[in-house]
């Protein structure tokens, strides 16, 4: 399997991380924690309902840093950001939990979910069923499966574990081959198209527009990365894409929720005050 160098490094480190976590907490113990977690909030259901109404279904991301950009947000309070996003009109949250490359944390997901009523996706590099159970134990409502990081057998196995735990799955693709594999292997209604090329880190919204005709109408397309202004939003909406995953544009704003509202709901009066941001 051909994978980008950065992704290859991340996946190698992820395997080490999982082994260390498994040594500290057994799968059996983790399954017990997952069974006691709050019921899932319905990630896919929330997005689909909003998109069917032809309203922006925004997955607002809580992300401190990235391998390509370094630290994106110094003043980083996940609970405050989550409340700001909810006030700004987000449908769901995405929280980075990868420690080494994105300066994320499991605790960030727990803090964000506790601070609001929105469904939350655990944004991480999922390669082992252990992580899926871990996601549910943390309170996540959905997991991300990145096609370029997995073979078809892994994808199917992880999705089956997610289904057994009532977790939704967002499958992420970047090109036609990955899309074909995802559609063949998984029945999840959520198909994310990453406009960022993981080989070059270049971003082009044409990626979503090019793949769109190949996606069945019963799947919900989530466009990921590169949404920076109203023209980008309108370009997608004209193409009947109403679900967006946005992180950096919000994280660089002084008040993330106000920026979300400005970008996606400009007709609304600004209900997100400075104090509801961070």
Image (cartoon, rainbow, N blue to C red):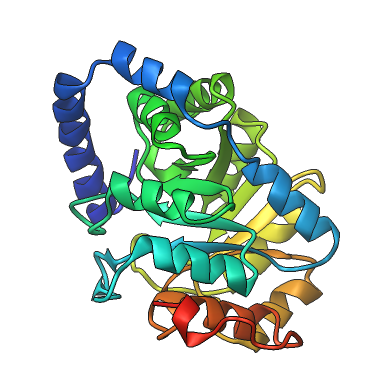
19 lies left or right of 160: left
Q: Nearer the viewer, residue 52 or 199?
A: 52
Residue at x-position 47% and y-position 19%? 35
How many marks overall?
A: 0
Return the residue found at the far right: 53
Where residue 228 sits in the image (x, y, percent)?
53, 82
Answer with the quarter of the image where residue 15 lies.
top left
Whether residue 263 is situated above or below residue 128 in the rendered picture:
below
In the image, residue 244 lies at what x, y percent?
61, 65
Residue at x 56% of width, y 44% of height: 170
Query: In this rendering, does residue 92 appear at all?
Result: yes
Residue 101 in the image: above or below residue 273 = above
For the N terminus, the image quarter is: top left
The residue closer to the viewer here, 257 or 52, is 257
Q: Residue furthest front?
A: 275
Q: Residue at x 18, y 52 (%)?
A: 100
Q: Is residue 32 left or right of residue 233?
A: left
Q: Residue at x 15, y 23 (%)?
A: 24
Would you identify the image quadrant in which residue 112 lies? bottom left
């Amino acid at each position: 399997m051909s994978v980008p160098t950065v992704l290859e490094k991340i996946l190698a480190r992820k395997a080490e991380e999982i082994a260390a976590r498994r040594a500290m907490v057994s799968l059996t113990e983790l399954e017990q924690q997952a069974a006691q977690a709050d019921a899932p909030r319905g990630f896919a259901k929330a997005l689909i309902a909003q998109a069917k109404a032809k309203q922006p279904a925004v997955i607002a991301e809580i992300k401190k840093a990235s391998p390509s950009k370094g630290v994106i947000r110094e003043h980083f309070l996940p609970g405050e950001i989550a409340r700001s996003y909810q006030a700004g009109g987000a449908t769901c949250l995405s929280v980075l939990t990868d420690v080494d490359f994105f300066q994320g944390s499991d605790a960030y997901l727990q803090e964000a979910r506790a601070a609001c009523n929105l469904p939350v996706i655990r944004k991480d590099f999922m390669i082992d069923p252990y992580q899926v159970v871990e996601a549910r134990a943390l309170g996540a409502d959905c997991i991300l499966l990145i096609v370029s990081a997995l073979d078809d057998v892994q994808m199917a196995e992880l999705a089956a574990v997610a289904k057994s735990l009532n977790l939704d799955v967002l499958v992420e693709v970047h090109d036609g081959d990955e899309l074909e594999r995802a559609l063949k292997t998984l029945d999840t209604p959520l198909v994310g198209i990453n406009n960022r090329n993981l080989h070059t880190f270049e971003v082009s919204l044409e990626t979503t527009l090019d793949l769109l005709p190949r996606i069945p109408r019963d799947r919900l397309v989530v466009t990921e990365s590169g949404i920076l202004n109203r023209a980008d939003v309108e370009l997608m909406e004209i193409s009947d894409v109403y679900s967006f995953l946005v992180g950096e544009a919000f994280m660089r704003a002084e008040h993330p929720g106000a920026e979300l509202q400005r970008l996606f709901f400009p007709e609304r009066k600004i209900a997100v005050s400075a104090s509801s941001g961070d």
